Amino acid sequence: MSVAPDNHTAIDADAQETREWMDALSAVIEKEGPERAHYLLEQLLEHARQNSLDMPFSANTGYVNTIEPDQEERCPGNIEIEERLRAYMRWNAMAMVVKANRHHPEDGGDLGGHIGSFASLASLFGAGFNHFWHAESQDHGGDCLYVQGHVAPGVYARAFLEGRLTEEQLLNFRQETAGKGLSSYPHPKLMPEFWQFPTVSMGLGPLMAIYQARFLKYLHARGIADTSKRKVWVFCGDGEMDEVESLGAIGLAAREKLDNLVFVINCNLQRLDGPVRGNGKIIQELEGTFRGAGWNVIKLIWGGNWDPLLARDKDGALRKVMMDTLDGDYQAFKANDGAFVRKHFFGRSPETAKMVEKMSDEEIFGLQRGGHDPQKVYAAYHKAVNHTGQPSVLLIKTVKGYGMGKIGEGKNNVHQTKKLGDDDIRAFRDRFNIPIPDSQLADLPFYKPADDTPEMQYLHARRQALGGYLPHRRTKADESFTVPSIETFKSVMEPTAPGREISTTQAYVRFLTQLLRDQALGPRVVPILVDEARTFGMEGLFRQIGIYNPAGQQYTPVDKDQVMYYKEDTKGQILQEGINEAGGMSSWIAAATSYSTSNRIMVPFYVYYSMFGFQRIGDLAWAAGDMQARGFLLGGTSGRTTLNGEGLQHEDGHSHILAGTIPNCISYDPTFAHEVGVILHHGLKRMVEKQDNVFYYLTLLNENYAMPGLTPGTEEQIIKGMYLCKPGVEGVNNPRVQLLGSGTILRESFVAQKLLAQDWGVTADVWSCPSFNELARDGQEAERQNLLHPADTPVVSFVAQQLQGSEGPVVASTDYIKAYAEQIRPYIPKGRTYKVLGTDGFGRSDFRSKLREHFEINRYYIVVAALKALSEEGKVPVAKVVEAIAKYGIDTNKVNPLYA
């Protein structure tokens, strides 16, 4: 990369002295090796720093391979057989995609798919599958593979040769509804025994993988599982590294010395639409970023047939051309031919032009990029897996669409190429020597050698040597636990004593504290925090179970003299992620899927400001659903009006709507401590004892008030989402109304119940609805059953069952937007008026009472809504509604809070 001179550039005042220093360094490199030269340079630099010299910094090395040819570990495999196997996989992957886009023209024809991505990294996968990636076995926990999403066809192609997938499945690529197909990308939900990790939402794979590698270290440090042999391999595209999540946690990986982590960045220089860095050099940029963060960086840029040219490059002319050439030009070289490369690359200097004057254009074009040289790939992998004390990143240069010829190789449109003509298919066959005759090419058949051929025997032998086949996913853990009985948590279930009011957040902490005391399940609890333990009253856990830190606590904490001092420990149980919701969620995902990745049931509890949950990391939450995660997410200080003083970006009024979009997320907005206890206990029973593939989201409050305690017999109704918590008793002949609520606003319904009775002679029954989401799902299922079974006795929704013995209109009020409670409107019994109050609009700072008045959800609005509903049913005169509005001082001309 061409770099403008900086302030450190100066005229050489003594060229002789400079040459002596250079010659001395060259002599050390030649006679004592690069390690000795590196040591001497480090000593010189440190000496300069100690003498206050302003030292220029560069994290970059030359645009050449990190590993010198004479330092390469030789590949022990049969390179020729591996090349043939790769060719068959390339062919089958291509055929799978092209076939999928030839069918069903009446449905639009195209199912999509990608050929170019796998074409660029087939050699990278071949080396891993044949020599490095361990499956789970008796003496190895198995490596974790985060496969680049767009290369799924290549992984399927390998599994087909291995006999793990059938031809019928390949023919049903991206055709899944009949149950025979293959998912477009890695999706554990869709292929639960195959894919481990969803990665095609680009950026999430690198982020999740870092925390997965860290969690494996955590399991080992705490003595829960031996993960010492396991590696986490992460495949990313160079274009994917523009996602902020891709690089967002690389500092953590270096800080915690995650030498079980290997990033492989496929640098084919192209993203979906064009060059990644047309005006720059992405490999150099990423080298500086990763080395500056503290990673071990291995660059593999040039294939072995460049080695003789580089060996002859005594004056550095070739290295200079390599460095000065921009990525946009490198892309153009592979999109053209050898004559073009001779003129526009080697022709940049007389020295380099002379180097290749005896080479043919075909030989020049055949100079490989490093990622297509299996020997060099093996050497790079070997160096990475044997490196200790740092995570490793391999920056490997490839060609996107390698082998696709004129239609795709190195072209901007290669990512979208999913159809090939007959000539293109013939050229592909010829380039990779696929034994399919011309007479069969029109059918584009898959190719699989006979089981007794050397290729197939080699394929299976290599995987058997590595413990079995990958990718592979475990669906249930082999171990089992019994959840403590509900009586264990009686401190949460019983009424609070007078003057001992608590919040639902405190109820959660009490439940968690009691669970941690269970000898069997307690060690499997993983509390996860994002620097808000004191906000949620969890600082007591610091001393009790400690904060995980692989380095322990090498300093004396400032609060050491306090009971609840900040305690870090190599065996600490808490994961404290700092101000980092995405990191917290990634740690939670690692713990919540440990039953699958590590055969260990873990129970993560991740608590955070609810506004910073699904809204900020919704893509990760969706990925958690895909991964069949099991655990608890807890949105603290929830609701639009509870967090007085914080304002617009802190006050959550919609997280339950977002949670409801994830099919296996079970969400609740409890009001009382006993509801929290019942829900958490039920979640443990489902996720730990039954190993159901669900996860739970609970919103918690920071308001203290008296807790009424559990009424026996209501547990099932709490779980289903609705129970009668305070029947009305005033007046036999009074008009009647049903008040529904959840979270903090349910308490406004209690006051409204009194006001309706004393001011208006209306009796109100109050229902706690811990989950409008679950009520809606139940109602939707009832409607579906009735639609599909019209002749059967109609199924009645749970909402209708609960309300069928009651009288009067129904008013629902929550601290969330109206859409949350609106979900159950279709299931309100016919003829009953339904009114919904909610907090649509942006949050703002003020006292709770003022916020509830602003959003029109307080006790007075509930009363007015109830009277209005009664008037619509002809049970009270409209004048009563007008009177109530005046009595409570409601401003009818104020701006709708949605637009305020």
Image (spheres, helix red, strand yellow):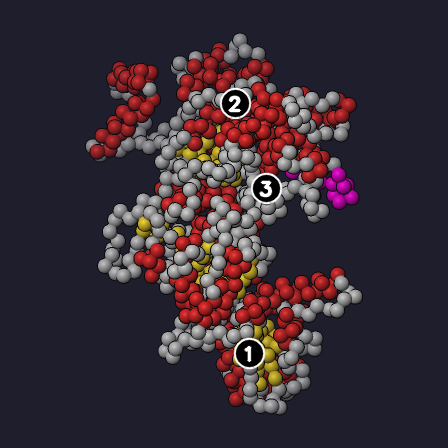
> What amino acid does circle 3 point to?
Phe
- Looking at the image, which residue is at 42% across and 42% down? 226
Judging by the rendered image, the residue that carries numbered circle 2 is 77
Reply above or below: 826 against 861. above
> What amino acid does circle 1 point to?
Val
Judging by the rendered image, the residue that carries numbered circle 1 is 766
Determine the secondary structure under disc 1. Answer: strand
Judging by the rendered image, the residue that carries numbered circle 3 is 194
Asked whether, in this view, residue 120 is left or right of residue 573, the answer is right
Confirm whether residue 302 shows in the render: no
- The reply to whether callout 2 and callout 1 are in contact (CB within 8 Å) is no
Q: Give the image location of residue 120, x and y in percent.
A: 57, 29
Determine the secondary structure under disc 3. Answer: loop
Confirm whether residue 485 shows in the render: yes
Determine the secondary structure under disc 2. Answer: loop
What's the CA distance linking mark 3 and mark 1? 49 Å
Closer to the chain start, of discs 2 and 3, is: 2
Asked whether, in this view, residue 870 is left or right of residue 444, the answer is left
Which of these two is toward me, 892 or 547?
A: 547
Packing grade of label 2 (10 A; few <14, some 14-19, many >=20) is some
Closer to the chain start, of discs 2 and 1, is: 2
- Looking at the image, which residue is at 52% across and 22% down? 77
Which of these two is toward me, 202 or 634?
A: 634
Camera-near label (2 vs 1) is 2
Q: Give the range drawn in magenta.
A: 103-115
Q: Give the image location of residue 62, x and y in percent.
A: 41, 25
